[in-house]
Amino acid sequence: MSPLSSPTANHYLSDDSELFWPDLKQVISSSSGFKRWVLERGLDANAQGKPLDGLVRSYLKQTLETLAY
């Protein structure tokens, strides 16, 4: 069972979490860490090809994987 499918994790990922995602995504995308991550990869956070939502999710995934390593 993956950590995101555990009962405890699902408790934290309730329907209410969708209400906070836009604000959280905005805060993360304005952070210096996210901006540096985008620049290091030659990405454009404003590009039409990959929406900001996908970039922030990729950033969070990679950051968490790095921390777990």
Image (spheres, grey):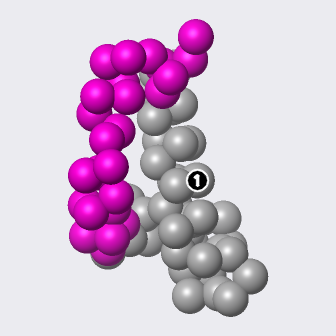
Task: Tell me the residue that label 1 is attached to.
Answer: 58
- Mark yes or no: residue 17 visible: yes
Q: Residue at x 38, y 17 (%)?
A: 7
Tell which of 2 and 52 is nearer to you: 2
Q: Which residues are magenta?
A: 1-28
Q: Is residue 61 magenta?
A: no
Where does the N terminus fall, quadrant-wise?
top right
Q: Residue at x 32, y 49 (%)?
A: 15
Percent x, y for residue 2?
Answer: 56, 17
The type of residue carrying mark 1 is Ser
Q: Looking at the magenta stretch, what is its main secondary structure?
A: helix
Percent x, y for residue 38?
Answer: 55, 69
Report whether 60 appears left or right of 10: right
Placement of 10 over or under 26, stated as above or below: above
Q: Residue furthest right?
A: 49
Placement of 11 over or under 58, stated as above or below: above
Q: Residue furthest front?
A: 15
- SS under mark 1: helix
Percent x, y for residue 65?
Answer: 53, 31
> Number of labelled discs?
1
Percent x, y for residue 55?
Answer: 57, 65
